[in-house]
Amino acid sequence: MDGLHDLGGKQGFGRVIHPWPPHDETWEPTVRAMTACAMRNHIYNMDEQRHAIERMEPRHYVAAAYFERHLTALASLLVEKGLTTREELEALAGGRFQLSGPIGPGREAAPPQRFEIGETVRVKDDYVAGHVRAPAYIRGKTGVVVAVSPPYPFPDAAGHGMQAPMEPTYDVRFRARDLWPDSCDDALNHVGVFQSYLERVSAT
């Protein structure tokens, strides 16, 4: 889905603050521990968590700190899995508890295919309603495969609790000027791209 979370390549946000001010909230380690516990016990998976963050209301997402986004995802998924209710959360919080928006449809992986190192590939120009791990700035762009990573569950299915086949990601090298013409340095960008997001470029 095209949400506010997909900020890669966007401009106008000012300089990156570094080093970032330290986190001193006492509840942050608890959120991390509860998230790890939920995943270890197969209550939900990493892609379901990512998609729950993507489904946050845009103003809430922008205003929320990093761990607040994770807390929202955790709470939303526990409600969706039937392990708690919004009413129980609001009783504990003493007021309104904002959850992520409703989950939409996922999609199945593309038919298996294999790409070779050195092969030129194109990222499919797909726009989907659900979870997707292809950043918007590489859609429709052409690059070269330089490495192959071990397989992982296809996120567009895994993020929706669907049966997700294992498929590799390809380290694809893009020319920065192909991604952002006239607004970047002459550099190379490497992106891990799932197999289903790629298509061959026909030889001319």
Image (cartoon, rainbow, N blue to C red):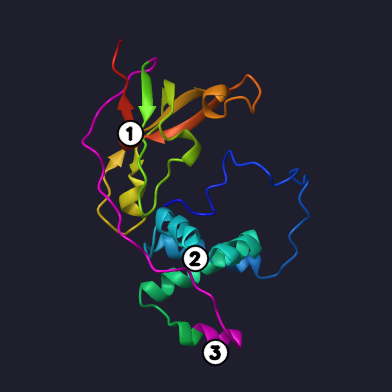
Q: Count residues near mark 3 (Cα–Cα under 10 Å), then give few for <14, some for 14-19, many for 20+.
A: few
Q: Report the residue marked by disc 1.
A: 195
Q: Position of residue 82 (x, y in %)?
A: 36, 77
What is the quadrant of residue 102 in the picture? bottom left
- Do labels 2 and 3 touch, CB within 8 Å? no
Q: Is residue 146 visible?
A: no
Nearest to N terminus: mark 3 or mark 1: 3
Identify the secondary structure beneath mark 1. Answer: helix
- Mark 2 → mark 3, Cα distance in angstroms: 18 Å
Say how many tags the image has: 3
Residue at (61%, 88%) from the top-left corner? 94
- Tell me the crowding category of disc 1: few under 14, some 14 to 19, or many 20 or more residues within 10 angstroms, Cα based: many
Instruction: Describe the element under mark 2 as helix, strand or loop.
Output: helix
Q: Main secondary structure of the magenta part?
A: loop
From this viewpoint, which residue is outermost toward the left? 111
Q: What residue is at 45 percent from the left and 59 percent from the top? A: 49
What is the span of residues highlighted in magenta in the rendered image? 89-118
Q: Amino acid at mark 2?
A: Ala
Q: Are marks 2 and 1 in contact (CB under 8 Å)?
A: no
Sequence-wise, which precedes: disc 2 or disc 3? 2
Q: Which mark is residue 91?
A: 3
Residue 176 position, x and y percent, is 57, 24
